[in-house]
Image (tube, grey):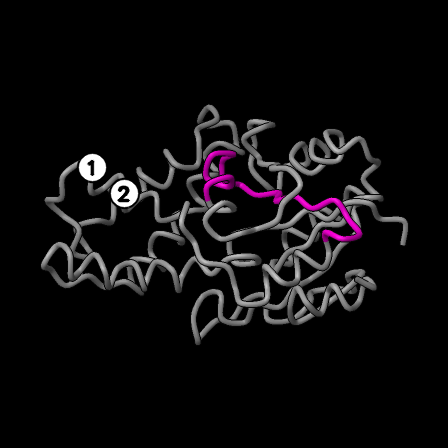
């Protein structure tokens, strides 16, 4: 395959957002002296993610940074999960948990192998600052940071995928989208990007029912980043 760059979905594909929020919620409960339902918070917060971005994709709202959307969603659900009455500095710290997400165990070693042969970048709805801080903390070995923020859009808008290829100075067919989400890959494939599906069957917890298998014949379907490195000869 004549691919020169791999671009990666991040939330769920490279990092474990749900597990990280649950673990951090346990620390917040001890620090703030209150019970916090970490699993409920993670699920409710993530459930508000796509609807918030759809307001922007639909044109009903001007572009807004994902940190802003996350904070608006947090404010709406905070009282339900033991986070009411906290001061602004504390809520800001909680909101930035999305900057501190832990990678899946196979992510960093797999990316290091892939980077020996390909250009690597996130292609995420997270902002540039979020993705940069996450990479620094988690040791994600990106060559550059690509984000929907650069194009004032959110996946699966075509301008995000095509904008990434343009900034990489590559035709779409020389870029591979790597994701654990069939919808993300479908949008990329429609624009002639190559595709790799990485199974993350517990992204949404042990009862996950979505994205357990490839929805169609992607170029690759693997169980880990290390498996993808094997498949691509790295």
Q: How many residues crowd around disc 1 within 10 Å: few (fewer than 14), some, or many (20 or more)?
A: few
Q: Secondary structure at mark 2?
A: helix
Does the magenta portion include 121? yes
**Considering depth in this image, is 173 or 182 the residue closer to the camera?**
173
Give SS at disc 1: helix
The residue depicted at 49 percent of the width and 71 percent of the height is 202
Q: Position of residue 192 (x, y in %)?
A: 81, 44
Q: CA distance from mark 1 to mark 2?
A: 6 Å
Q: Which residues are magenta?
A: 115-133
Mark 1 in CB contact with mark 2 (< 8 angstroms):
yes
- Residue 175 vertical placement versus 181 (above, below): above
**Picture coordinates of residue 214, whole percent (x, y):** 69, 67
Compared to residue 182, the image places residue 63 above or below, namely above
Quadrant that contains the N terminus: bottom right
Residue that carries the numbered disc 2 in the rendered image: 93
Note whether 187 is above or below 162 in the view shown: below
Q: Residue at x 14, y 39 (%)?
A: 87
Q: Nearer the viewer, residue 43 or 29?
A: 29
Give the position of the C terminus as an image quadrant. Answer: bottom right
Q: Residue furthest bottom?
A: 206
Report if residue 164 lies within the magenta region: no
* Residue labelled with disc 1: 89
Q: Give the left or right position of residue 212, taking residue 41 as reference.
A: right
Residue 158 rendering spot, x and y as whole percentages: 68, 36
Count of marks, rendered view: 2
Looking at the picture, tell me which residue is in the foreground, 215 or 153: 153
Q: Which mark is residue 50?
A: none
The residue sitting at 69% across, 46% down in the picture is: 120
Q: Residue at x 34, y 58 (%)?
A: 21
Image quadrant of residue 196?
bottom right
61 with respect to 111 (left or right): left
């Amino acid at each position: 395959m004549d691919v020169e760059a791999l671009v990666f979905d991040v939330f769920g594909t490279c990092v474990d957002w749900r597990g990280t929020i649950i673990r951090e919620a346990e620390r917040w409960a001890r620090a703030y002296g209150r019970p916090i339902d970490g699993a409920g918070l993670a699920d409710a917060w993530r459930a508000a993610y796509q609807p918030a971005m759809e307001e922007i994709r639909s044109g009903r709202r001007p572009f807004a940074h994902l940190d802003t959307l996350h904070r608006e969603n947090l404010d709406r659900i905070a009282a339900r999960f033991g986070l009411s009455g906290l001061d602004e500095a504390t809520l800001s710290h909680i909101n930035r948990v999305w900057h501190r997400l832990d990678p899946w165990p196979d992510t960093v070693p797999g990316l290091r192998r892939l980077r020996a042969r390909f250009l690597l970048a996130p292609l995420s709805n997270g902002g540039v600052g979020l993705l940069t801080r996450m990479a620094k903390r988690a040791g994600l070995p990106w060559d550059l940071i690509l984000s929907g923020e650069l194009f004032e859009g959110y996946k699966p808008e075509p301008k995000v995928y095509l904008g990434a290829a343009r900034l990489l100075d590559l035709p779409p067919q020389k870029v591979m989208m790597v994701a654990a989400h069939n919808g993300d890959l479908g949008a990329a494939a429609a624009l002639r990007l190559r595709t790799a599906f990485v199974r993350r069957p517990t992204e949404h917890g042990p009862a996950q029912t979505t994205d357990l298998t490839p929805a169609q014949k992607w170029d690759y379907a693997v169980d880990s980043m290390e498996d993808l490195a094997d498949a691509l000869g790295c």
